[in-house]
Image (cartoon, rainbow, N blue to C red):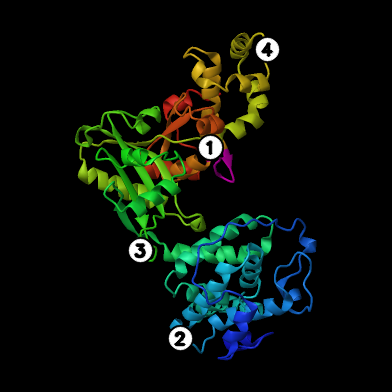
């Protein structure tokens, strides 16, 4: 089926006067684009209660859980198809897409979800064309026609959905609209698999549009526009920025903050990293966030500590640019400050507590008898149990350096970071990021983040990941073979 035939399927292409009728169906279509509203609706709990958009388009009445009636759903599909009409220009397609975006800005989350479903289910590649092209490609393998048949097959698998997304990207603010749309859609994916086709298509398109070759690395300083610093405060995901004074401390002359920016998202950081300069690898977050601490002289420091890396755009999940950010920042810092020799992080362990709560009984069983006896004495008068151990670790700062409880938690942390894998990747999300970039697990730090968040995530433990620039590829190779690279100090803690 060619594009023109597909556009005419089920609905008619809008005529020039269709806009007025469309506006009556979609109140607010002529209003300015506004920020996405924060509404929550419950996702349907059972797939059998959901009608496909194909069934709904052929119906006359809506089901109870459906937001748009069949008539309005048909009109919405008509307007979406009009955006990718092959007989109109890119500019006109972008103008029509902007009209739909205006309606979307005024719609409820339930109505928006109906539009996502239309984009996901009604804009797929024609299965008959794909099947025929695949057969021709299979028959051509090994012949002079193989290359041409492969190109034909690739073209057949390109869906109208991709063209639709491209047209939305044309108008001013269109890429911002799409990134926000995906961010809002992501929480619904697990409950409604019908949306996955749209999600995968958007991830593919964003990976192309936001390729690191198109991104600018910029330093964010206290001299940056206030609007940009406000976004830094809003997007900080690791250590909350508590005040403007806190922000100033992180952007002072003895610190660095760098972000990736895209030309179509002006003054919107995609990801940013905060760096402190020290004379040794940091073992606590407190001095790094201390607004009254004496400033360091970056020119005399030997160590750069990456203490916070935040993805600022949830809608770009799956688009990888953190690896390139770290490399670009390291190269920038080395050129500016040649005395820097050590590049490390001071990182949270956000999944440790939940993992340890589940695994504590098994880990206690693996603990050597002599160490179990020491733990039992430390817990008296409570009997030795996994629950008693976890309760005793609630206030890590109260445990002295010789406490067997302290060593046991460090051992558990080493097992979590150095052995635990999920789907072939490190279980901890922060470890997955840094180890995937070629770092290694260097050192565990006791009570390094005593904040409520730090205790809630990891009993206040933090970890240093070391970026040894000569061994990044070696560490990545280790990880690909299922072995997590760790230092000898961390290796010694494993049981």
Marks 4/3: CA distance? Answer: 60 Å
Q: Which residues are magenta?
A: 421-428
Quarter of image, res 114: bottom right
Horizontal side of residue 474 vs 314, given as left or right = left
User: Is there any visible trace of residue 216 in the rendered image?
Assistant: yes
Residue 427: say if magenta: yes
Residue 308: say if magenta: no
- Check contact, mark 4 vs mark 3: CB within 8 A: no
Kind of element beneath mark 2: loop
State the residue at coordinates (51%, 15%): 399
Quarter of image, res 129: bottom right
Instruction: Return the residue at label 3.
Output: 214
Marks 4/1: CA distance? Answer: 28 Å
Image spot of residue 36 (x, y percent): 54, 62
> Vertical placement of 373 versus 323: above or below?
above
Q: Which quadrant of the figure contains the N terminus?
A: bottom right
Sooner in the amino-acid sequence: mark 2 or mark 1 = 2
State the residue at coordinates (61%, 55%): 187
> Vertical placement of 19 versus 420: above or below?
below
Quarter of image, res 346: top left
């Amino acid at each position: 089926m060619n594009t023109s035939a597909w556009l005419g399927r089920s609905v008619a292409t809008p005529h020039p006067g269709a806009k007025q009728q469309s506006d009556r169906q979609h109140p607010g279509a002529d209003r300015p684009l506004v920020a996405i509203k924060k509404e929550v609706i419950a996702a349907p709990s059972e797939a059998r209660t959901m009608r496909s958009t194909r069934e709904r388009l052929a119906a006359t009445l809506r089901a109870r859980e459906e937001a748009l009636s069949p008539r309005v759903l048909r009109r919405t599909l008509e307007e979406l198809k009009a955006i990718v009409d092959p007989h109109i220009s890119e500019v006109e397609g972008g103008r029509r897409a902007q009209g739909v975006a205006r309606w979307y800005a005024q719609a409820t989350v339930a109505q928006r979800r109906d539009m996502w479903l239309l984009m996901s289910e009604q804009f797929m590649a024609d299965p008959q064309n794909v099947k025929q092209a695949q057969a021709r490609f299979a028959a051509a393998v090994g012949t002079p026609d193989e290359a041409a048949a492969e190109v034909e097959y690739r073209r057949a698998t390109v869906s109208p959905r991709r063209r639709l997304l491209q047209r939305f990207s044309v108008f001013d603010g269109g890429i911002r609209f799409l990134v926000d749309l995906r961010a809002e859609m992501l929480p619904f994916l697990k409950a409604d698999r019908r949306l996955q086709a749209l999600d995968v298509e958007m991830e593919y398109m964003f990976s192309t549009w936001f390729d690191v070759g198109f991104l600018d690395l910029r330093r964010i300083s206290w001299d940056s526009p206030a609007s940009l610093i406000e976004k830094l405060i809003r997007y900080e995901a690791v250590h909350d920025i508590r005040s403007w004074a806190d922000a100033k401390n992180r952007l002072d002359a003895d610190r660095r903050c760098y972000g990736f920016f895209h030309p179509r998202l002006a003054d919107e950081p995609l990801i940013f990293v905060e760096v402190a300069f020290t004379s040794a690898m940091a073992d606590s977050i407190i001095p790094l966030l201390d607004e009254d601490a004496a400033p360091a002289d970056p020119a005399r420091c030997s160590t750069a500590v990456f203490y916070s890396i935040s993805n600022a755009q949830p809608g770009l999940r799956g688009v990888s640019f953190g690896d390139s950010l770290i490399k670009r920042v390291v190269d920038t810092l080395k050129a500016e400050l040649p005395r820097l020799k050590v590049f490390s992080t001071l990182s949270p362990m956000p999944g440790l507590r939940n993992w340890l709560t589940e695994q504590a009984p098994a880990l206690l069983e693996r603990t050597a008898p002599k160490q179990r006896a020491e733990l039992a004495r430390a817990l008296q008068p409570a009997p030795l149990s996994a629950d008693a151990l976890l309760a005793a670790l609630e206030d890590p700062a109260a445990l002295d350096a010789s406490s067997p409880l302290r060593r046991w938690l460090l051992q558990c942390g080493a097992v979590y970071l150095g052995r635990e894998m999920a789907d072939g990747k490190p279980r901890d999300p922060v470890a997955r990021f840094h180890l995937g970039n070629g770092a290694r697990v260097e050192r565990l730090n006791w009570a390094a983040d005593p904040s409520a968040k730090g205790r809630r995530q990891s009993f206040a433990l933090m970890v240093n990941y070391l970026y040894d620039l000569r061994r990044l590829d070696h560490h990545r190779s280790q990880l690909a073979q299922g072995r997590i690279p760790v230092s000898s100090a961390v290796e010694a803690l494993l049981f």
